[in-house]
Amino acid sequence: MEVNELCGKLSTVLKMDLAKKDSDNDYFNAAVLIPLIWDNNQLSVLFEVRSSHLSWQPGEICFPGGRIEATDKNSVDAAVRETSEELDLKIDQIQVLGSLHEIVSPIGVRLYPSVGYISDVQDIKASPDEVAEVFSVPLAFLLANEPIVGHMERCTRPLSDFPFHLLPGYSEKWKSRKNYRVLFYQYKQYVIWGLTAQVLYDFLLVCKKIVIPSDCHI
């Protein structure tokens, strides 16, 4: 086989592998929707409290969303589908306004956030299988209050199958690798934190680029 032929085949295979939709990595690929609603005469952000019997983050506050399935056209469709299922809404009741940059979390989640507006608030019915309750926070409140910032440390430690004999003297203890910030928003009895708070923070940065009048109404 000539070098040019080999390079051509490598180029083809590389393009094919790059085109795969993260099928061979360890990331949990998910999509969420930041739902805007009109509540108590003001524009607000809707949140969910996860059901206490869920195996993943029970009782925590989140945006509607979930895993991106193979049947979803893209991350936006996944976010809308999940929102429709969790809030018992029709697809056409969710007006998609756009998307934010994806977030890759230190815990192995690749998250694709979108923003939407739900006008038919009276039709929202939280799915009891996944959602314990829903609540809203005025956008004006979120814009006026900076989050509390904490930090966590990411570390690594070799496990039992690590070939220490190949690396004489390699430590078996935990090794500090990187610190990363964790954001917290407090509203009444609710604490919005973690990845949800990071998505919210990124969305609020976008909101701060435009002037939202106090007398904004529907």
Image: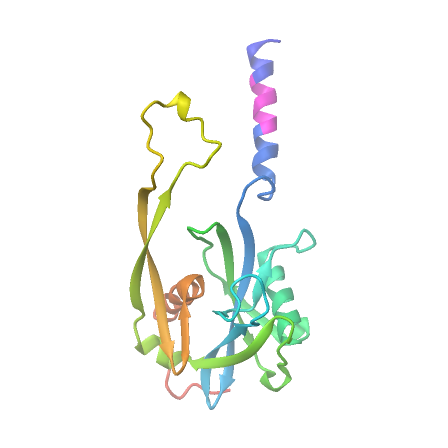
Q: In the figure, is residue 150 to the left or right of 198?
A: left
Q: Residue at x 64, y 76 (%)?
A: 128
Q: Residue at x 57, y 64 (%)?
A: 65
Please indicate whether residue 165 sits to the left or right of residue 1 in the image.
Answer: left
Residue 142 position in % (x across, y down): 37, 76
Left-right relation of 24 to 143: right
The residue sitting at the bottom extreme is 40
Q: Position of residue 197 (x, y in %)?
A: 41, 66
> Magenta segment, principal secondary structure?
helix
Residue 188 coordinates in the image, percent (x, y): 39, 83
Q: Is residue 96 magenta?
A: no
Asked where in the image residue 92 lies, by quadrant, the reply is bottom right
Question: Magenta stretch?
Answer: 7-13
| Location of residue 8 by image quarter | top right
When the figure is inspected, residue 52 is found, relative to residue 150, above or below; the finding is: below
The quarter of the rendered structure image containing the N terminus is: top right
Height in image: 23 above or below 93? above
Say if residue 212 shows up in the picture. no
Residue situated in front as seen by the camera: 92 or 172: 172
Q: Position of residue 186 (x, y in %)?
A: 36, 76
Q: Nearer the viewer, residue 152 or 124?
A: 152
User: Residue 11 colored magenta?
Assistant: yes
